Image (cartoon, coloured by chain):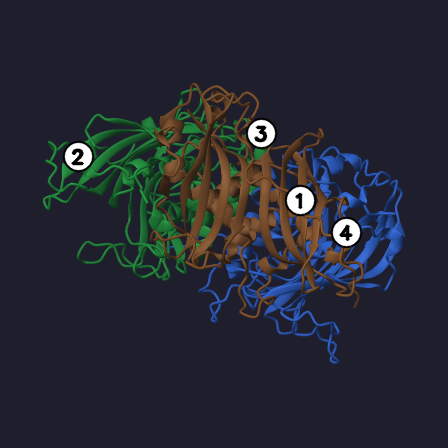
Chain colours: A brown, B green, C blue
């Protein structure tokens, strides 16, 4: 039996700075993705739920949830970038450049922008900038992430280290506001809450109250839907403890959906400034979320403001507690520490 | 940490007779909802399955399963009406006023039509009349339900009791027959059974034979799809026994789908006259169903008759047994006792 | 309680050679089916994923996965043909005659082509040829299968035995190539692998590496989506051991999706020459797959070749091992032994 025709993924020594990879399996988004997203996550944001609400907000119809595009585009990079990854280390400079609608086809490509071999000589950090484009060639989203990748040949020489400088956050003026977006006629009843941009204060913390217990079938349905192939999510025989590790993006979408309760008007994510998957998540875990307002900004769109939010997901214990212990490490029940920009009516 | 921006729901003392609530998150229905419904429930009715069959029946295309509209519209009312509910007490006067198609957007509102504080002073019964409209403002469905809701402030004064008079059943002449519906060219082969309106007798009981065991992932996917947020369905930490209570509507749809076997020609539900969720349902339960013909009526549509059916769901033991014990209470394995009008070829 | 209006299915003595059955519940395929298929199986083939890729291959848009049509059409036959089946014995002469798209409605009918009572007098083998047509009357797929079916009345006389002669494989010249299919401008980057028709050798074996553990919720969602009603898949009370038997087609789709890794360019299945479900599959099983190249053929379509592939699924132990023991029986971990023709760029 030979595995010679199967994809071994890239190892650390296979990456070169400046190299560009076109990823496999372009994917046309559909109404089926929207329905499954709604079934998988407790989302109730009005903009990606109702064509009428979207039209009243200046869009041609209801856009898909922003994270659908992110998960699909991200999933495409896995077989090339992170099949041999030991850890996902971070995200930066992720911008959602236009709303996505059913019928849009995403194609993803990646440029290697940094490399640094670890001192142990067995692995190294790879920085990549990826972008997904629609059929007309327009960029729909872009992001940087960095991962620790194993070497296949430990004797392969270390590359010249290149560590890219990355923005700590996307600047407010660089946020891509969906063309035509206008919240001046916003219907707060239909959106579900009365709080507008001016009602949120920097430093304010919002407990999103609700919790959601994850089943194996749920996270696997989601992760396959994004065509993300990392075997640790699907194969109970892969880990010695027989558990499947839940795709970090599943926790992102779950936390985002839970954040509706208290941030119902934060209708659309336009940037991910950074993020960490602090601890692994497994089936049976009950996920809770809270947010902290990190920054506020005006935008040129009528009636539209931006909130920079820390979105935190914790598991099994929603008691308010510090995010990190005295040693600076994340508390054991913290799953996700994400930093996003979202748009909200002023 | 503050929860002050999150939705606490209405307590008994917050409701006033005559008050109107516009519910959050209008929802555009899609082909994705249809596919998920088919995956979640063993439905095989031809009308909501096939565009061709629907066209041959006088409709422009295949309508969505009636209960999709019901679940979506009902789910919208939960965050306002029943977040602090202790019990769902009943349904009445529910009419399905027109078929729903992918692309239709439902918006739901509710009028408070009755209030009666309980003698313990800690809770009370709230009667509400809700309606869902499509974008053109036309009513798609309406229903009355009553729930027992906790008081937040037990010292709040009791309101003047108002108990609405409700019909025991929707009158046959008030059933809304879908415009254009015509069963004169009905294809019984494609529908799956030969029994027509004239073949059913009042008092006849039909055992639907098949059983379906429910998994946690399934009922949560369904309940989220309807954007129903009641936390008891999703959070394994909410109840002391660690079990999640299954949304009563999940059992309704399951029983309706099982009823295909013996009522394959009862193509569309046009009214729910009443219903009780007799006992709680949990993952692992195996659901069976039987129906009893309660009444029959003619309709003005060509070839279309109406059957009034009691649809009963039981769990784990399908042995024929009385619905209620000698004490008048439902037997412990009865989940659902629903009273509906459905349309069937004459 | 009477079950007299419910469908008892056909017993062996109910079948006559030459008899034709029109099956219930025509089904319109939708984008929802595509999304659910992607969520249920780890498929990454570019043709059924991307409208753009499909257009570049000469098709009007992205066709649905071939097996969606197969499962839907097959499911229709279950209530009539195999409700009282003891065993699925085999498939033959299955051809996929045209790509299916969202909006297509499938109607299925079956002709009884063979009958042979077993020597025990309690059951017999029934051979059927089934076909699914779209609304315009064009055949979309056809297949032969044979099943062992119980007798209801063991005293019913044995029919004259008729055993049809079936082709061991569909001839290459009888494969239906989708109209317009053209792989001359094929983008191997977007497809995910570089191996073309010429790179595969007869006798070559490809280990598809990845494994996928099945949950109860997943196989039941799938099987209901195809409106396949065999109760053994859904009812935990049906078997004494409380386990639900997984629909064999679920294993077929899982194995096909896993085969992407090593056969990413085998974009579309055009025939199933034969197949055996060697052992039962249950929730908790981890499924792996491997393929063997059985034959190769040219086709008249530009840039399009055909591979005849044995697709094998095994459970829980992916160690290379003989398919059959010395007694000629399948090894205990073999689930599926399928023989297909697929199209691939030359």
> Looking at the image, do the residues carrying marks 3 and 1 touch, with CB atoms under 8 Å apart?
no
Q: Chain of mark 2?
A: B
Residue B150: x percent and y percent? 20, 43
Q: Which residue is mark 3?
A: A174
Q: Nearer the viewer, mark 3 or mark 1?
A: 1
Residue C323 position (above or below residue C66): below
Whether labels 1 and 2 share one chain: no
> Looking at the image, do the residues carrying marks 4 and 2 touch, with CB atoms under 8 Å apart?
no
Q: Chain of mark 1?
A: A
Whether labels 3 and 1 share one chain: yes
Q: Quadrant of the N terminus of chain B?
A: top left
Residue C123: x percent and y percent? 61, 67
Q: Chain of mark 3?
A: A
For marks 2 and 3, give the CA distance. Answer: 53 Å
Q: Residue at x 23, y 26 (%)?
A: B19
Q: Nearer the viewer, residue C327 or A308?
A: A308
Residue B342 in view here: no
Residue A30: x percent and y percent? 60, 36
Q: Nearer the viewer, residue A331 or B107?
A: A331
Residue B306 position (above or below residue A162): above
* Label 4: element kind: strand
Whether labels 4 and 3 share one chain: no
Instruction: Kindly identify which numbered label has been placed on residue C271.
Output: 4
Q: Quadrant of residue B5?
A: top left
For marks 1 and 2, give the CA distance. Answer: 65 Å
Q: Which residue is mark 1?
A: A164
For marks 4 and 1, give the CA distance. Answer: 51 Å
Q: Nearer the viewer, mark 4 or mark 3?
A: 3
């Amino acid at each position: 039996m030979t595995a010679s025709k199967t994809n071994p993924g890239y190892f650390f020594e296979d990456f070169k700075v400046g190299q560009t990879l076109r990823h496999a399996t372009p994917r046309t988004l559909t109404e089926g993705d929207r329905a499954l997203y709604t079934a998988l996550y407790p989302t109730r944001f009005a903009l990606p739920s109702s064509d009428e609400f979207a039209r009243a907000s200046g869009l041609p119809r209801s856009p898909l949830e922003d994270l659908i595009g992110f998960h699909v585009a991200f999933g495409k990079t896995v077989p090339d970038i992170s099949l041999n990854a030991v850890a996902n280390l971070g995200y930066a400079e992720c911008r959602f450049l236009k709303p996505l609608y059913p019928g849009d086809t995403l194609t993803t490509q990646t440029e290697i922008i940094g490399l640094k071999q670890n001192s142990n000589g067995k692995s190294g950090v790879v920085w990549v900038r990826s972008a997904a484009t629609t059929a007309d060639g327009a960029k729909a989203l872009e992001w940087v992430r960095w991962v620790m990748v194993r070497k296949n040949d430990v004797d392969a020489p270390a590359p010249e280290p290149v560590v890219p400088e990355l923005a700590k956050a996307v600047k407010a003026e660089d946020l891509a506001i969906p063309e035509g977006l206008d919240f001046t006629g916003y219907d707060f009843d239909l959106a579900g809450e009365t709080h507008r941009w001016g009602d949120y204060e920097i430093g304010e913390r919002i407990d999103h109250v609700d919790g959601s217990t994850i089943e194996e079938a749920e996270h696997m349905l989601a992760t396959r839907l994004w065509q993300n192939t990392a075997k640790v999510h699907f194969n109970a025989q892969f880990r010695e403890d027989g558990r499947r590790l839940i795709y970090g993006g599943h926790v992102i979408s779950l936390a985002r959906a839970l954040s509706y309760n208290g941030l119902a008007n934060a209708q659309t994510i336009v940037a991910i400034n950074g993020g960490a998957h602090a601890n692994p998540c497994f089936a049976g875990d009950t996920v809770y979320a809270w947010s902290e307002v990190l920054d506020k900004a005006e935008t040129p769109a009528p009636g539209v403001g931006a909130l920079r939010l820390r979105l935190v997901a914790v598991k099994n214990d929603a008691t308010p507690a510090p995010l990190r212990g005295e040693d600076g490490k994340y508390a054991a029940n913290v799953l996700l520490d994400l930093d996003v920009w979202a748009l909200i009516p002023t």
